[in-house]
């Protein structure tokens, strides 16, 4: 993309869009709000304690190292692991790539990778890339709510299996897997098989104790806990061997070359600590708003379908609804004009007119998948926000359906 050719178009688009009277941001799946306390921690790091290079032996270097060290202690407490078991990346996508590709590079004989059919593309793509190098990739089916088929998983486990990667919480439909049962199935078959958790959407949203899960690897993303973008982490259980996937000058860690983003890591740790300290209050608030939004939409808009399970088997923040006879991208634009910001399907494929692989895996039809809208509630939202959003959806869906050649009775 040549940005200079786009600048005028984007400016014109923004001017034509206008500024809504009220805004409700529900797209924290892709990028979102940051705790003010985390921003203050970042500001302090940028201005002082985090400006140096943590591997350089002068005062500013040691200050940066101390900030990195204290942040790591905080994250280790929140994750229930040892500080030395945390490796930093700059995103959850990088952490997933390091986990899968790094393990494969270190593998001596095993050449089989098992993932679920609804994993994030930052898990799917590295696995499929490795398939070009002689690895065999198996995708385990899920049921209509998105729960992984453990019988199918068990039948695929053998002494060729290197890795099983399953997200405790799915990023699109919010289904909460029984990770303890999945790990037990794997380890009962062969303790040498490694288990990786893409925990980006699970961390601080459900109880997650890395020490207790028995998993070998787990990926995390700062922005998913209302910290800044630019920080991610990979839990690597002591004794698990990985190889680097990028190469360059090392700083304080051996698996990810380049200088650590100290201010972002400090903000990540501050946000994670806030979420954990207020876990019950925040998750209760988010799930209450989630159910208010789901009920308000599905009870007032006909032919609207909830994707994924309801209630306690669903992440407290996740709302994913398909609107029949409605194109998701068109609905996203209509809602944006009303100041409500949502996403259509997975952001990773939002520029390509392909339905979400997650929704197809739970047996949604193409037209249902194309009409899906993903939203996330947060600790920042209020009941008034939700009560504003619901009638906006009613108006937007009615307008789009009135223009659809497939509208009811048309």
Image (cartoon, helix red, strand yellow):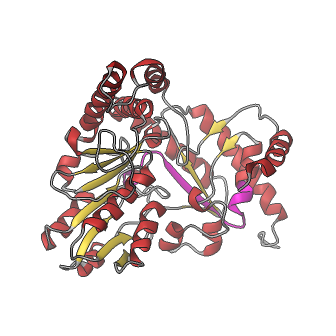
The picture places residue 378, in percent across and down from the top left corner, at 50, 38
Residue 176 shows in this picture? no
Q: Nearer the viewer, residue 45 or 410?
A: 45
In depth, the one of 206 and 388 nearer the eye is: 206
- Vertical position of residue 119 compared to residue 312: above or below: below
Q: Which of 110/147 is in front?
A: 110
User: How many discs mark residues in the rendered view?
Assistant: 0
Q: Is residue 142 above or below residue 61?
A: below
Q: Residue at the location (42% across, 78% down)?
A: 132
| Residue 84 in the image, given as x and y percentages of width and height | 21, 41
Of 366 and 295, nearer the camera is 366
Does the magenta segment cover residue 326?
Answer: yes
**For the point 25% across and 62% down, which residue is it?**
195
| Residue 254 image point, x, y percent | 28, 48
Q: Which residues are magenta?
A: 312-331
**Is residue 37 toward the left or the right of residue 369 in the image?**
left
Residue under the image location 64 percent in, 60 percent down: 350
Image-quadrant location for residue 41: top left
The answer to whether residue 39 is above or below residue 82 is above
Q: Quadrant of residue 328?
A: bottom right
Q: Residue at x 55, y 56 (%)?
A: 320
Q: Measured from the top left, where is residue 110 in percent x and y?
A: 23, 76
Magenta run includes residue 14? no
**Location of the C terminus (image quadrant):** bottom right
Q: Kindly indicate the quadrant of the structure image that contains residue 144.
A: bottom left
Question: Horizontally, is 182 left or right of 307 in the view?
Answer: left
Left or right relative to 288: residue 247: left
From where the camera sits, is residue 87 visible? yes
Give the answer, above or below, for where 107 lies relative to 14: below
**In which quadrant is the N terminus drawn?**
bottom right
């Amino acid at each position: 993309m040549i940005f200079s050719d786009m600048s005028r178009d984007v400016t014109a688009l923004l001017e034509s869009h206008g500024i809504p009277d009220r805004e409700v941001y529900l797209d924290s799946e892709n990028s979102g709000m940051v705790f003010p306390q985390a921003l203050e921690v970042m500001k302090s790091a940028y201005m002082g304690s985090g400006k140096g290079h943590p591997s350089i032996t002068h005062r500013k270097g040691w200050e940066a190292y101390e900030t990195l060290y204290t942040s790591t202690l905080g994250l280790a407490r929140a994750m229930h692991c040892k500080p030395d078991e945390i490796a930093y990346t700059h995103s959850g996508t990088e952490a997933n790539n390091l986990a899968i590709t790094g393990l494969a590079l270190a593998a001596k004989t095993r050449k089989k990778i098992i993932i679920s059919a609804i994993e994030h593309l930052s898990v799917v793509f590295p696995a499929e890339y490795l398939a070009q190098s002689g690895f065999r990739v198996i995708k385990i089916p899920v049921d209509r709510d998105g729960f992984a088929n453990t019988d199918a998983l068990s039948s695929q486990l053998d002494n060729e299996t290197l890795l099983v990667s399953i997200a405790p919480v799915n990023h699109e439909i919010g289904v909460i897997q029984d990770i303890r049962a999945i790990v037990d199935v794997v380890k009962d078959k062969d303790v040498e098989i490694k288990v990786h958790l893409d925990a980006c959407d699970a961390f601080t949203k459900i109880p997650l104790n890395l020490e207790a899960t028995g998993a070998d690897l787990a990926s995390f993303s700062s922005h998913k806990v209302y910290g800044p973008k630019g920080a991610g982490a990979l839990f690597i259980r002591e004794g698990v061997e990985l190889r680097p996937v990028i190469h360059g000058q090392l700083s304080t860690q051996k698996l990810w070359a380049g200088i650590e983003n100290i201010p972002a890591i400090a903000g990540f740790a501050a946000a994670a600590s806030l979420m954990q300290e207020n876990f019950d209050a925040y998750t209760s608030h988010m799930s209450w708003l989630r159910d208010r939004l789901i009920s308000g939409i599905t009870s007032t808009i006909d032919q609207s379908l909830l994707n994924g399970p309801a209630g306690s088997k669903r992440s407290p923040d996740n709302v994913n609804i398909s609107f029949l006879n409605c194109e998701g991208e068109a609905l996203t634009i209509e809602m944006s004009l009303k100041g409500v910001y949502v996403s259509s399907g997975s952001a990773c494929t939002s520029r390509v007119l392909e339905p979400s692989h997650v929704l197809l895996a739970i047996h949604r039809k193409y037209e249902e998948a194309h009409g899906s809208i993903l939203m996330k509630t947060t600790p920042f939202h209020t009941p008034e926000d939700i009560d504003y959003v619901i009638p906006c959806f009613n108006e937007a869906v009615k307008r789009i359906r009135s223009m659809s050649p497939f509208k009811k009775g048309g």
